[in-house]
Every structure is written in C-alpha cells, then in structure tokens.
Amino acid sequence: MIIRDAEVADAQAIGEVHVASWQAAYAGLMPEDFLARLSVESRVASWGRRIDGNVGRVLVAEEDGVVAGFAAFGDAQLYALYLLPEYWGRGLGRALHDRVLEELSGDSAVLWVLSTNERAKAFYVRQGWAPDGATQTETIDEGRVTLEEMRFRRSLP
C-alpha cells in the first residue's frame, strides 16, 4: 500500500471512490433516489478543482496500482475519508487516517459524521475520536436531503 499526495490526475479515481463509498455506506441512511443520482463526473470536477487549487490537502491510498481510498483534511479538520467498499476492513482506512493525523497540526482536530452512520462512528471511536456534543444540520440535493451530523474531536499526537 502507498499513501501519497493526490494529483489532479487522481481526480477521476477519487470521484469514483467518493460515489461508490457513499452509495454503499449511506444505503438505508439517505434516500435511495439521491444515492442513485450521484454523479462521478461532478465529483471528478470538484476534486480536480480542489486539488489544483490547493484547497486543503488530499491524500490517496493505492494498493496494487488502484486508488482504493482518499482523505481530505486541513485546518485541524478531517473533511473526508472514504474507501472503495471492497477495501473496507482491510486496514487501509486506518493507515490513511493515521497518515492524516501525522500531517495535521495543532493540539486537536475535529470531523463531522452523519449521526446515523454507526459504522463510521465506531471506526472513529476506535481511532481515539469522541463526540464533543456539537451537532449541525445540513441540506443537500437542492434542499431535498437533510443530514444530521455530529462532531467528533481528538487530541493530535
């Protein structure tokens, strides 16, 4: 496994990981029609702009030449950590997470998790994160999907 900084050329693979992981992780937690309409193309464009514009940092995890996951972070916050579903439970998520922690600066960091995503919450608790009591509501898909999120915090090494 290789963990490295993402390049603009990785945007296609990152977009594919993003959509596949959302469709698997959020099945039953978000409307089925919304998940079915997720667009790899729009994610590719968004990630390409983010990487090219140096908006935060993006790392990718490769295994046997396949971009199996990615993480986006900056400003003492982990914004996203996603893997292709077939790589779940194989240690890539933890390795990517640990690399992000090495790169973040400050005393502590935060992340936001969908409050109904028990799998993600359990993963982060195992990595030393804990809910800090903050919550937020976000709407996406032109207001058709409401996300209730909770914030987790942990000390940095």
Image: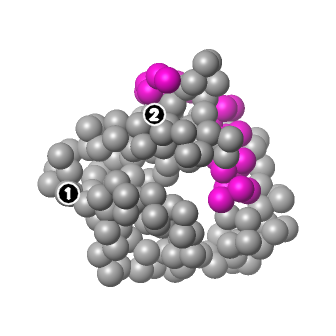
Q: Main secondary structure of the magenta part?
A: helix
Question: Which residue is more in the foreground, 14 or 116?
Answer: 116
Can you tell which mark lies on residue 6?
none
Magenta segment, which residues? Answer: 1-25
> Residue 41: in sight, yes or no?
yes
What residue sits right under mark 1 in the picture? 155
Viewer-nearest of labels 2 and 1? 1
Residue 4, magenta (yes or no): yes
Crowd tier of the residue under label 2, counting other residues whose Cα lies within 10 Å: few below 14, some 14–19, many 20 or above? many
Q: Can the viewer see residue 57 in this picture?
A: no
What residue is disc 2 on?
Answer: 59
In the picture, measured across the screen, residue 21 lies left or right of residue 115, that is: right
The answer to whether 118 is drawn above or below residue 50 in the figure is below
In this rendering, position of residue 64 left or right of residue 154: right
The image position of residue 134, as x and y in percent, is 35, 79
Residue 84 coordinates in the image, percent (x, y)? 65, 42
Separation of residues labelled 2 and 1 (CA atoms) = 21 Å
